[in-house]
Amino acid sequence: MERKTKVHAEEGKQEIFITREFDLPLELLFKAYEEADIVEQWMGTKVVKLENKQHGGFEFETSDNKGNVVFRANGTIHQFVPNENIIRTFEIMGTPHGIQLEYLHFESISPEKSKLNMQIIYRSVKDRDALISIGVGMAIGIDMAHNRLEKVLSNLQ
Amino acid sequence: MNLRRDVFQAIADPTRRAILLLVASQAMSAGAIAANFDTARPTVSKHLQILTECELLEQVQQGREVIYHLNPLKMKEIADFIEPFRQMWDDRFNKLEAIMKNYTPKKK
């Protein structure tokens, strides 16, 4: 099966690269980052705040089915150039692993195809490795949805 | 019988894998961990003991409580977290692509 999303994490480095080609025109890809209600759908989190501008910021919040907040993240947007790039910080609340810096670069491949390059820089190698595992844990839900958990964890073996 | 506690034995059990993911999100006490499971408290304690013996978890004394932390370096030895991470982003991006293929501009 074709792997559309590629992740490159070099051993011993405090950064990670994520690249993905989309069957979407550049403008539509960028719009998915621009409009809060669309971000909510594909990120699977509530968007409390999204100010897409230089010196703007964002806040994400995810609740379990009992209404308890299980995930909070926020960041500052340092650069926002439509259809080109977003530079922002990203912080998961409640972890001791620092704040990450994210460079998102959007480019057009053809009128119907586009590409996203993401570079994420962490405070240290140890923080990178910890935050990657936390990110996965958060994504599958801390409410112990066992079936989904099993599916993700089966990849550990 | 003295079983050698190796990491592969530790992650063979689904409850122990669930404990690892829970602690990965936040360091917590044995009581807080046990509250997430229907399993009896002594059973959870046994799991924590095994995970600590094979160094996947680290114990830190905090006042009267023992807090369990994930040892990310040990986790890396046994499990490459990159692939689940890649799949997480792949799922998100697949969703993004599907949503935007059906996108109709809002009426202003």
Image: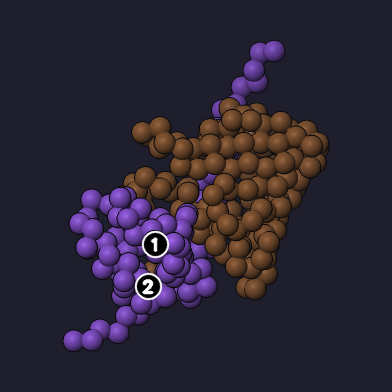
User: Dot 2: within a 10 Å radius of its alpha carbon, few (fewer than 14), some, or many (20 or more) residues?
Assistant: some
Amino acid carrying label 1: it is Arg
- Looking at the rendering, in which quadrant would you find the N terminus of chain B? bottom left
Chain letter of disc 1 in the image: B
- Looking at the rendering, in which quadrant would you find the C terminus of chain B? top right
User: Dot 1: within a 10 Å radius of its alpha carbon, few (fewer than 14), some, or many (20 or more) residues?
Assistant: few
Rendered residue at 42%/75% (across/down): B55
- Check disc 1 and report the residue beneath it: B64
Horizontal placement of A93 versus A34: left or right?
Answer: left
For residue A93, the mark is none
Q: Position of residue A3 (x, y in %)?
A: 55, 56
Residue B102's quadrant in the figure?
top right
Give the chain letter for purple. Answer: B
Q: Position of residue A24 (x, y in %)?
A: 65, 38
Horizontal placement of A17 versus A151: left or right?
Answer: right
Rendered residue at 70%/55% (across/down): A119
Amino acid carrying label 2: it is Thr
Rendered residue at 62%/36% (across/down): A59
- Check disc 2 and report the residue beneath it: B52
Depth check: B86 or B97 in front? B86
Residue B14 visible, this angle: no
